[in-house]
Every structure is written in structure tokens, then in C-alpha cells.
Image (spheres, rainbow, N blue to C red):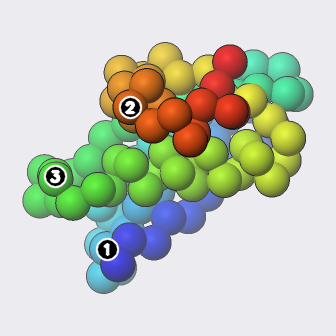
Amino acid sequence: MIEVKQNNDEKHGSFEAFIDGNRAGLMTYTWAGEERFIIDHTEVEEAYNGKGVGKEMVLAAVDFARKQGKKIIALCPFAKATFQKNEDLQDVVV
């Protein structure tokens, strides 16, 4: 099971994914004003490639955006591709 934890401050934040207590991935973002944030980087540890770690972090970002009434700008190629492939996530994309 993948557990995703969020770290957030006034300018930056991240979503970290863990599997069995081991860090499996990291997705970073930067705030662009108060209403939106930019996903700028996603990385998955090699041992966890193909296990859905990246998508789980994107889903956590979408959940956060929906709950907080924020929008997402996806500059990271992985996040951008994930949004393009999943129409049900596009409501939070700028």
C-alpha cells in the first residue's frame, strides 16, 4: 500500500510517497499566488517504478487542490501526461 504525506509552506511543498515505510517517490510544487500551485518535478525511486507511485502522488495533489479550492499548473512532464490521460482529474488543472 502506498502512503502519501504532504509537506507545505508559504512558497513550496511536496508530496512524498512511502511503501512499507520506505520512501518510494517525491513530487514537488511551488505556489503561484494564493489560488494555484505548480507541480514542477516528480521522481520515483527505481525499485518502485511501475507500481503507480507517481499517479498516487498526483491523486494526492488533486485531492488537496479540490479540498482547498486551488488549481494546479502541471509543468512536470509526468504530471502533465497524467492529467491528459485522466479526464476526471482535469477539473483542477489551469
Tag 1 residue: 19
Residue in the image at 75% along x and 19% along y: 32
SS of the residue at dot 1?
strand
Q: Is 86 drawn above or below residue 76 in the view shown?
A: below
Within 10 Å of disc 1 (Cα), the crowding (few <14, some 14-19, many 20+) is some
Q: Is 23 drawn above or below residue 66 in the view shown?
A: below
* Quarter of image, res 27: top left
How far across and how far down the image is residue 56, in percent?
43, 56
Within 10 Å of disc 2 (Cα), the crowding (few <14, some 14-19, many 20+) is few
Q: Say whether marks 2 and 3 touch (CB < 8 Å).
A: no
Q: Nearer the viewer, mark 2 or mark 3?
A: 2
39 horizontally vs 32: left or right: left
Q: Quadrant of the N terminus?
A: bottom left
Q: Amino acid at mark 3?
A: Asn
Residue in the image at 31% along x and 41% along y: 43
* Quarter of image, res 10: top right
Q: Nearer the viewer, residue 84 or 14?
A: 84
Q: Quadrant of the C terminus?
A: top right
How far across and how far down the image is residue 46, in percent?
13, 51
33 horizontally vs 1: left or right: right
Q: Earlier in the sequence, mark 2 or mark 3?
A: 3
SS of the residue at dot 3?
loop
Within 10 Å of disc 3 (Cα), the crowding (few <14, some 14-19, many 20+) is few
Q: Is residue 90 visible?
A: yes
Tag 2 residue: 85
How far across and how far down the image is residue 5, in percent?
56, 64
Q: Nearer the viewer, residue 38 or 83?
A: 83
